[in-house]
């Protein structure tokens, strides 16, 4: 099973705008100093880099997937089974959904399951005075990382 989070959106988000959102959002969730995210656009995908981790975003236009009238983004951690990379993928998906009024699909129940608004995901991830990666993933409802 692939570790990925989907985003259904009316139009593709601007990768640079998503990167500008991701840095402050992830820094806030982890209660760290501001670390900016960078975007590396490639032919068929773009990669968001934050600190030492990355998330890969693949965009599919309408008609290339089951959501015929919408764009679909597949957001996956750059490395498998690394909590911070997975959290970056979730925050990237949330930022993309916020940027173009889309919604996040969690078909594999990695962060609680179902269809979730980007803002709702961020609210779930930010609670509590001290925040570790494990705390943020637990707040998002991920059971995968607590085994």
Image (cartoon, rainbow, N blue to C red):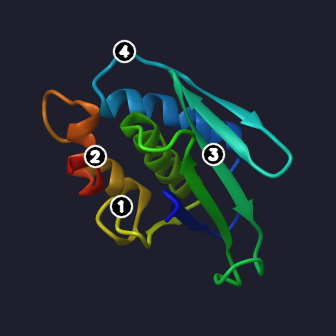
The CA distance from mark 4 to mark 3 is 24 Å
- Residue pointed to by mark 3: 56
Q: Earlier in the sequence, mark 2 or mark 1?
A: 1
The structure residue drawn at horizontal position 28% and vertical position 46%, both measured from the top left corner, is 137
Crowding at mark 1 (Cα within 10 Å: few <14, some 14-19, many 20+): many
Kindly give the residue lying farthest to the top in the view shown. 33
Question: Is residue 139 toward the left or the right of residue 101 in the image?
Answer: left
Q: Earlier in the sequence, mark 1 or mark 3?
A: 3
Q: Earlier in the sequence, mark 2 or mark 4?
A: 4
Q: Which mark is residue 33?
A: 4
**Is residue 125 at least partly visible in the picture?**
yes
Which residue is more in the foreground, 33 or 54? 54
- Residue pointed to by mark 2: 137
Q: Which mark is residue 110?
A: 1
The structure residue drawn at horizontal position 70% and vertical position 64%, both measured from the top left corner, is 11
Is disc 4 placed on a helix, strand or loop? loop
Is disc 3 placed on a helix, strand or loop? strand
| For the residues bearing labels 2 and 3, Cβ distance under 8 angstroms | no
């Amino acid at each position: 099973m692939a570790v990925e989070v989907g985003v259904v959106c009316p139009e593709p988000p601007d990768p640079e705008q998503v990167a500008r959102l991701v840095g402050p959002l992830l820094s806030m969730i982890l209660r760290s100093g501001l670390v900016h995210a960078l975007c590396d656009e490639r032919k068929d995908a773009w990669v968001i880099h934050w600190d030492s981790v990355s998330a890969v975003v693949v965009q599919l236009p309408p008609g290339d997937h089951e959501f015929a009238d919408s764009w679909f983004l597949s957001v996956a951690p750059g490395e498998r089974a690394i909590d911070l990379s997975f959290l970056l993928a979730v925050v990237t998906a949330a930022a993309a959904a916020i940027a173009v009024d889309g919604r996040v699909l969690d078909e594999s129940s990695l962060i609680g399951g179902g269809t979730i608004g980007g803002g709702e995901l961020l609210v779930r991830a930010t609670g509590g005075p001290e925040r570790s990666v494990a705390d943020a993933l637990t707040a998002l409802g991920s059971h995968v990382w607590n085994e």
